[in-house]
Image: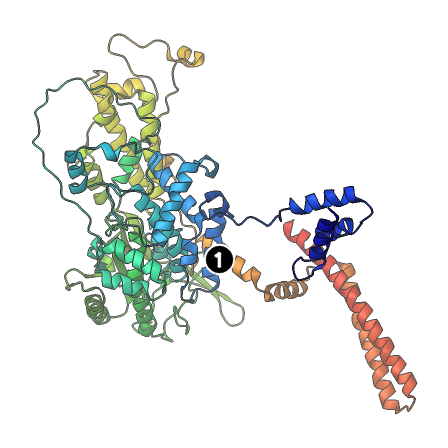
Amino acid sequence: MRSLVVFTHRILTNSNLVTTSTTSTTLLYSLSNHLNPRANGFALFRLLSFTPTHRRAPDPDDPSTLMREDGVSVCSQMWIENFREPDKIANNLTSYLRRFELWVLAYQKVCADEMGAYMPRSAVQRSALEDLLALRNAVLDDRFKWGARLQFFIRSPKDKTDYESLSKRKIKTILTTTQPAAFQDRIVQEVLFMILEPIYESRFSQKSFAFRPGRNAHTALRVIRRSFAGYLWYIKGDLSTVLDGMKVGLVISALMRDVRDKKIIDLLKAGLTTTVITTTVEEPKKKKKRKYQKKRVLADDEPKPDPYWLETFFGFAPEEAGKVPSWGHCGILSPLLANICLDELDRWMEGKIKDFYRPSKNDVIWNSPEGEAEHGNTSWPEFVPTSGPDKTRKMDYIRYGGHILIGVRGPRADAATLRKQLIEFVDQKYLLKLDSDSIPIEHITKGIMFLDHVLCRRVVYPTLRYTATGGKIISEKGVGTLLSVTASLKQCIKQFRKLNFLKGDRDPDPQPCFRMFHADQAHTNAQMNKFLSTMVEWYRYADNRKKIVNFCSYITRGSLAKLYAAKYKLRSRAKVYKIGSRNLSRPLKEKKGLSPEYHNWLRMGLVESIDGLQYTRMSLVPEADYTPFPNNWIPDHEKALLEYVRLESPKTLEEQRFCIREQGLVSPQDYISMLVWNYKKNAIAMDQISLIKSGSNDLEKEQQLLLSSKNENYNDQNKEDEEHEDGFHVAEVRISD
């Protein structure tokens, strides 16, 4: 035992074998104590049984260790980085493709579309996370195949099919018929969309408004009302055939202008080139006897279908917004890819706008070098004063999806030249053959249809008041134009007729909507009220908002009256209005006899309250929204991002301090302290100047004076910093108040 202790003591004292740590030092001390053999034996046992505790490496196959952050915070950081450096080439996007948080977020989004309800992160099962990790690893290792029909890394929670036990006939049907996009394909598309969207949103032109966050048809109409006043000639172009599909080489070349990551490019290229199976097997239809159909009950995990009012409103989608691109196996990514390809057209048009601009000194608007100066009254920015024949040459451009609108202020020959150049550019860039008939040039007096609204010119004669020399106020009649944006009643009638709500064009006759035949009166009225509220919001910026909404209310009310007349056997709409009142808010008669006292049943809670139809009179419809629209408008989320990026700059704090001082947002005490500090500084400077002028040779006195001035400067500077901090607190309180 003694020899073993000595041997162990020699091992521990060898610095080349054992590091000097706290544990080894304690053991060495106990082993070197030869007088206590019991303690030596216990220490030897501890040494031989000791196992070093190293930190365990994270398991790469454990999903819980890969979710270090929240997916939303990762996406937010990507948006901030791209808006901080919008011109930077994206080289390393595979690092974001490895982030498991993005895959979990994509899984939640696809499950929300699949199940009809949002799944929180804590509700995602362990097996789903493991399958999701397997999908991510397959994408990174190039083992993922687009459009798989039988082999999946992860499946939808709704998919309970046992693919191993399927018959050959069912397998053949799955492989040869059109199938919706696989669940795992949509997850991969969502991840790619979250990575690519912030890159291109920081680069896209402000002239495009479709398939982009924060921009919609309303913002396009407001921009037209704000910026297109004064243009005489309009060019409309329909490039929607581009949305049907483009050559893969053109899409990849457009992507590689800003993205140089091989993994991302190869993944997108495979999604665009993989063949989509659309062949359907026609089976002979068997004649079935018509029998009573039971009411269909939705499953627990089945999403609810769109309500009737929403389906009706979707039928009013304008032509420009009716087509959504879907290319290959990149259905979710297709709108973004279409905007990436058409962004080259936007940039080309921006260059043409700058080259076309020719200011005129004789014109009262747009005569500044920038061409974006405010004109007329700021509270009425759409007003354009009429000037002489020598006008400023200017044009503007807007794109909504595959439809473009160009306004030209100048002779028609300039518009024809621009149209010729546009046809050549589209032919060279997108290999799309256009002719002059497909891109017409129309005068503003004929009315231009865009987004189901008619753009026309309205001449106004306002009274202009200005101050002449000598301070005399002169009033005179002026003449100018306004761009009138009105909803198309003809287009509205066409959409109602398509939805079987009416028949006839000149004298439209409402038709009963038998889709709501089995619903009660309260539910039917509630559905139509939601539809009318949505229509009021859709025509919010139309000059004829009252007229068009009142027409929609007339058609809806007449359709319901005919439905109730057929349902309750009242024979005519007049009897329905007599019993149910003008807005159909009273309960109608049942098949046999009168209904019980409605108010008593309502008081006892046995029936639902019936809401009358809205906007039965034109006076109840709100006025059009003429809120002034900023000239260089950007969405709120871009404003927040740009403000956040600006606040991260180190110069921003100093600029804010300077602005606070300039605006006087400091307390009187701070102002007095600043004056005292300036007085002391000036007094010390005067003493130094007088000492130098006196020519004194007393070096000790001069050194003491300089030393005292430095100390006072240092102490006063510290006081000034403290006082300024107090001043900032006072300024923050004033700003918050």
92 vs 600, nearest the viewer: 92
- Can you see residue 671? yes
Residue sitting at x 24%, y 55%: 272
572 vs 47, nearest the viewer: 47
Could you tell whether 268 is left or right of 642 in the image? left
What sort of colour scheme is used for the picture? rainbow
Tell me the kind of residue under disc 1: Ile
518 vs 617, nearest the viewer: 518
Counting from the top left corner in percent of width and height, residue 361 is at 38, 76
Above or below, 501 against 404 in this view is: above
Counting from the top left corner in percent of width and height, residue 106 is at 39, 45
Q: Which residue is mark 1?
A: 80
Above or below, 330 against 260 in this view is: above
Residue sitting at x 43%, y 48%: 102
Counting from the top left corner in percent of width and height, residue 570 is at 22, 16
Residue sitting at x 15%, y 35%: 168
Counting from the top left corner in percent of width and height, residue 600 is at 41, 10
Could you tell whether 467 is left or right of 93 in the image? right
710 vs 496, nearest the viewer: 710
Above or below, 40 against 645 in this view is: above
Label 1: state its secondary structure.
helix
